[in-house]
């Protein structure tokens, strides 16, 4: 016979009922057929010829049939392939008659072994899409067990990227925490300074501290915001730089009798 087809494998999908699968290619012996089963999670198991399945049609150039011991469910794939042993069993005798039939069978087997190497190489190796391509095409498959990169052009694995991401996140968190602490510290310092300034103003107004000199008023303060309530005693003229003064929510400025609070933009507030 001749090996007239390059096909040496076929794949079927399980449907939960079928357990008989045609083998549309020539194989020498029933034992030369192998099979793999893949479930919907991608787990692959090798089936055992004579245990998990049986084969008929060895030696028939039209192929044969594989019959599995069970019907595989929907979501599974059954891969049937020709897998002859890599042996040479034809024997030639000196001065003997040329064994044409066994010689042809040996050539058939050699052709089958070459075809097997071809499809396994194509299916299992990482290939370039053409001889001119300068890259490999994984055809949608994962590439696993990649070591950590060493040189700039090396591929990287998920673990390495995750470590870089975690390191960057930790560094960013540290910077944010440091900035937060600095801002809180600055806010506290500013609040303390404002409170001290307001307390000093109140001390001036009550006469318990020397008054700041002013050409317009013996009492003055220069902050734009009053964050602590202030009482201006009676018969006092208080002076502030404007153009406007803001009073923090919940705080008040109390102006005593016959007293004035003058703001630099010309506005005047009295009792």
Image (tube, rainbow, N blue to C red):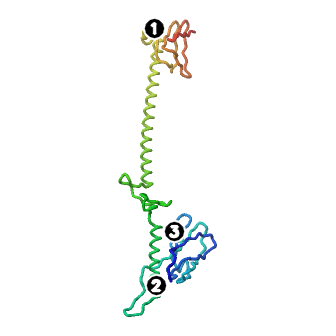
Residue lying furthest right: 17
Instruction: Please name whichever residue, 234 or 267, is drawn nearer the observer in this view of the structure.
Output: 267
Which residue is drawn at the image coordinates 53% and 8% (left, top)? 260
Answer whether residue 68 is visible to the viewer in this image.
Answer: no
Between disc 3 and disc 1, the foreground one is: 3
Mark 2 Cα shell of 10 Å, populated few (<14), some (14-19), many (≥20): some
Cβ–Cβ below 8 Å for labels 3 and 2?
no
Which residue is drawn at the image coordinates 55% and 67% (left, top)? 39
Instruction: Please name whichever residue, 71 or 208, is drawn nearer the observer in this view of the structure.
Output: 71
Q: Is residue 270 left or right of residue 165?
A: right
User: Where is mark 2, residue-wise?
Assistant: 104
Quadrant in which the C terminus appears: top right
Mark 3 Cα shell of 10 Å, populated few (<14), some (14-19), many (≥20): some
Look at the numbered disc 2 and give the secondary structure of its residue. Answer: helix
User: Where is mark 3, residue-wise?
Assistant: 44
Cβ–Cβ below 8 Å for labels 3 and 1?
no
Mark 1 Cα shell of 10 Å, populated few (<14), some (14-19), many (≥20): some
Q: How many labels sit on residues?
A: 3
Q: Position of residue 180 (x, y in %)?
A: 45, 35
Answer whether residue 2 is visible to the viewer in this image.
Answer: yes
Q: CA distance from mark 3 to mark 1?
A: 94 Å
First in sequence: mark 3 or mark 1?
Answer: 3
Look at the numbered disc 3 and give the secondary structure of its residue. Answer: strand
Instruction: Please name whichever residue, 94 or 262, is drawn nearer the observer in this view of the structure.
Output: 94
Which residue is drawn at the image coordinates 53% and 64% (left, top)? 42
Q: CA distance from mark 3 to mark 2?
A: 35 Å
Between disc 3 and disc 2, the foreground one is: 2
First in sequence: mark 1 or mark 2?
Answer: 2
Q: Position of residue 168 (x, y in %)?
A: 43, 45
Q: Which numbered dot is residue 218?
A: 1
């Amino acid at each position: 016979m001749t090996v007239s087809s390059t096909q040496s494998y076929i794949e079927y999908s399980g449907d939960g009922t079928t357990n008989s699968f045609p083998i549309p290619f020539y194989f020498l012996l029933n034992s030369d057929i192998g099979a793999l089963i893949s479930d919907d999670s991608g787990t692959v198991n090798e089936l055992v010829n004579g245990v998990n399945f049986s084969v008929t049609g060895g030696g028939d150039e039209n192929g044969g049939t594989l019959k599995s011991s069970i019907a595989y469910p929907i979501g599974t794939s059954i891969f049937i392939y020709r897998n002859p042993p890599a042996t040479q069993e034809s024997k030639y005798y000196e001065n003997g008659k040329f064994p044409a039939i066994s010689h042809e069978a040996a050539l058939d087997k050699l052709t089958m072994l070459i075809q097997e190497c071809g499809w396994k190489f194509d299916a299992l190796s990482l290939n370039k899409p053409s001889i001119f391509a300068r890259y490999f095409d994984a055809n949608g498959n994962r590439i696993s067990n990649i070591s950590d990169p060493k040189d700039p052009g090396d591929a990287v694995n998920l673990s390495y990227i995750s470590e870089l991401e975690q390191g960057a996140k930790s560094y960013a968190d540290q910077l944010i925490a440091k900035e937060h602490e600095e801002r809180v510290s600055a806010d506290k310092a500013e609040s303390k300074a404002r409170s001290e300034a307001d307390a000093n103003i109140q001390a001036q107004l009550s006469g318990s501290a020397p008054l700041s000199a002013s050409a317009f008023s013996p009492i003055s303060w220069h902050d734009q915001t009053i964050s602590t309530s202030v009482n201006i005693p009676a018969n006092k003229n208080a002076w502030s730089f404007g153009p406007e003064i803001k009073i923090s929510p919940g705080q008040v400025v109390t102006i005593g009798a016959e007293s004035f609070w003058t703001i630099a933009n010309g506005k005047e507030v009295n009792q």
